[in-house]
Amino acid sequence: MDEARFLSLALANERNREILSRLPALGLADCWLVSGSLFQSVWNGLTGRAPGYGIKDYDLFYFDPDTSFEAEDRAIARARAHFAPLGIEVELRNQARVHLWYQGKFGTAYPPLRSSGEGIDRFLAPACMVGVAADGRVYAPHGFADIEAMTVRPNRAPNFSAERYAEKAARWKAMWPELTVIAA
């Protein structure tokens, strides 16, 4: 699968297109639609399912050196109001702040990031490691082969959790039984 085919299938999901068209109005730096809503839309296209099937939320990453809780909270509130008319769950996170709360939530250390791309690099599986910016740029550090093959394998990033990987892989396998899941 090449980038054009990936985008064609990911953007067959009207919600992905709508989010990307609305993203610039938030005025957030290094902002990307990431992971599940993208690769799952592709899986849906490959298996003949409706484009939004199985997608529980739409994740957005941005990078702002202001790591205060208040600044991120204001951005989240703006995004919530901005995307409310779409009737979907949109989760926005400042990647510059993740190291401040990750260990408390997941029990694993998380080194500071320097960009949203580095946050994408830390996803649990290479198939998850994709992002699309409003200007059409695609970030896929491991390409699209695992997405196309519907294969989920562990990404041994510094924050990898076999338990979280198994939990997510089991959910995906239940939704897309065609998946091949490589054990952690």
Image: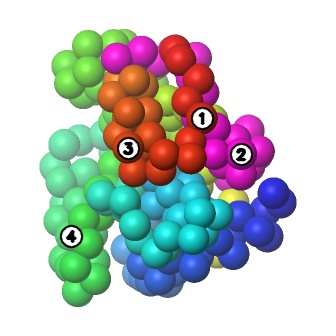
Residue 29 in the image, given as x and y percentages of width and height: 49, 60
The quarter holding residue 165 reads top left
| Residues shaded magenta | 139-163
Relative horizontal placement of residue 19, taking residue 126 as reference (left or right): left
Q: Quadrant of residue 25?
A: bottom left
Q: Which residue is mark 3?
A: 174
Q: Could you tell which of marks 4 and 3 lies nearer the N-terminus?
A: 4
Mark positioned earlier in the residue sequence (1 or 3): 3
Q: What is the number of the mark on residue 149?
A: 2
Q: Decide if residue 162 is in sight here.
A: yes
- Circle 4 packing at 10 Å, graded few (<14), some (14-19), many (20+), is some
Residue tagged by mark 4?
A: 80
- Residue to which mark 1 is pinned: 180
Mark 3 lies on a secondary structure that is helix
Q: Is there CB contact under 8 Å for labels 2 and 1? A: yes
Picture coordinates of residue 2, whole percent (x, y)? 83, 60
Q: Is residue 1 magenta?
A: no
Quarter the N terminus occupies = bottom right
| Label 4 or label 1, whichever comes before in sequence order | 4
Q: Nearer the viewer, residue 150 or 32?
A: 150
Instruction: Sort mark 1 into few (<14), some (14-19) or many (20+) by Cα contacts within 10 Å.
Output: some
Q: Nearer the viewer, residue 54 or 154?
A: 54
Q: Position of residue 51 (x, y in %)?
A: 49, 73
Look at the image and say whether residue 154 sits in the magenta stretch: yes
Where's residue 46, x and y in %?
64, 63
Return the disc, 4 or 2, that comes first in the chain's sequence. 4
The amino acid type, in three-letter code, at marker 1 is: Thr
Vertical placement of residue 118 versus 18, above or below: above
Residue located at (53% from left, 17% from top): 183
Badge 4 element: helix
